[in-house]
């Protein structure tokens, strides 16, 4: 039938019983022009009976495939964090609870929060455990975020001789002044970064935020950070 951004009304010039298969597409790197079929979601299949002139509603149930390895899951629901503040970071990544900010926390009971000020104007953080990622295979980072200040991520590769190389990932632009504050999701492919570092034996994710020019404060909220690959 084609590619549609949901929710959508899709005209079908047919009647009777039909089977429909729906694949999940995502905006890779958050870019509209980079819409791809996400390899880690199952397709959704349903059988419908079509009647001329009537509308049938379908709500696809999206699930992950079974043969996946979640190398990292940080949902901020556990007492500890998978991300540590760097030694020279001025700001800190802290828990923000639903009780303290019910209009902000959307998933579960907590999210991660970075608050920048003119004094604490720099945040640096890195994953606390090394990531074991396959080369020449699909690897993605998923992250939910809501921010009014720019932040960036990097992929850090380390080899057996402790030689470290850093590959920048796309930045997260702050919401525009006329935008409604809302959570967004980004899917970041790592296959090229990971495969390019042929001697690397482990990887980390690095987070960096500097208070935007002209601002006296800024915030970054993050949640549901996952690093996913095949088993």
Image (cartoon, helix red, strand yellow):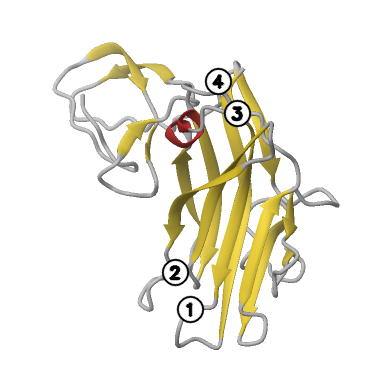
Q: Is residue 24 left or right of residue 203?
A: left
Give yes or no for contact between labels 2 and 1 (Cβ–Cβ under 8 Å): yes
For disc 2, the marked residue is 174
Vertical comparison of 5 with 171: above or below: above
Residue 185 point in image, percent of width and height: 48, 49
Q: Residue at the spot x=64%, y=24% of the render? A: 69
Q: In the rendered view of the protein, which quadrant contains the C terminus?
A: top right
Label 4 or label 2, whichever lies nearer to me, is 2
Q: Quadrant of residue 10?
A: top left
Q: CA distance from mark 3 to mark 4?
A: 18 Å
Label 3 or label 4, whichever lies nearer to me, is 3
Q: CA distance from mark 1 to mark 3?
A: 33 Å
Give yes or no for contact between labels 2 and 3 (Cβ–Cβ under 8 Å): no
Q: Quadrant of residue 105?
A: bottom right
Q: CA distance from mark 2 to mark 3?
A: 30 Å
Q: Of helix, strand and loop, which one carries label 2?
A: loop
- Number of numbered labels in the structure image: 4
Give yes or no for contact between labels 1 and 3 (Cβ–Cβ under 8 Å): no
Vertical comparison of 157 with 109: above or below: above
Image mark for residue 133: 3
For disc 1, the marked residue is 212
Q: CA distance from mark 4 to mark 2?
A: 32 Å
Q: Dot 3, how many residues are within 10 Å of its Cα: few (below 14), some (14-19), or many (20+)?
A: many
Q: CA distance from mark 2 to mark 1?
A: 9 Å
Q: Earlier in the sequence, mark 1 or mark 3?
A: 3
Q: Of helix, strand and loop, which one carries label 3?
A: loop
Image mark for residue 65: 4
């Amino acid at each position: 039938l084609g590619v549609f951004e949901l929710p959508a009304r899709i005209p079908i010039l047919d009647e009777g019983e039909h089977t429909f298969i729906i694949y999940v597409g995502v905006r890779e790197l958050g870019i509209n022009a980079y819409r791809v079929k996400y390899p880690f979601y199952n397709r959704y299949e349903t059988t419908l009976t079509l009647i001329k002139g009537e509308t049938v509603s379908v709500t696809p149930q999206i699930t992950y495939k079974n043969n996946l390895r979640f190398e990292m899951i940080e949902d901020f629901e556990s007492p500890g964090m998978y991300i540590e503040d760097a030694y020279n970071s001025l700001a800190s990544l802290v828990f923000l609870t639903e009780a303290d900010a019910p209009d902000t926390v959307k998933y579960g009971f907590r999210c991660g929060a970075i608050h920048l000020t003119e004094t604490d104007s720099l945040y640096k953080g890195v994953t606390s455990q090394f990531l074991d990622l396959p080369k020449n295979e699909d690897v993605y980072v998923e992250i939910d975020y809501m921010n009014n200040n720019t932040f960036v991520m990097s992929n850090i590769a380390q080899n057996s001789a402790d030689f470290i190389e850093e590959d920048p990932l796309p930045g997260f632009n702050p919401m525009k002044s006329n935008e409604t504050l809302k959570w967004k999701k980004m899917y970041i492919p790592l296959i090229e970064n990971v495969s390019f570092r042929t001697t690397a034996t482990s990887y980390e994710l690095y987070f960096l935020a500097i208070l935007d020019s002209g601002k006296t404060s800024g915030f970054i909220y993050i949640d549901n950070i996952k690093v996913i690959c095949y088993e």
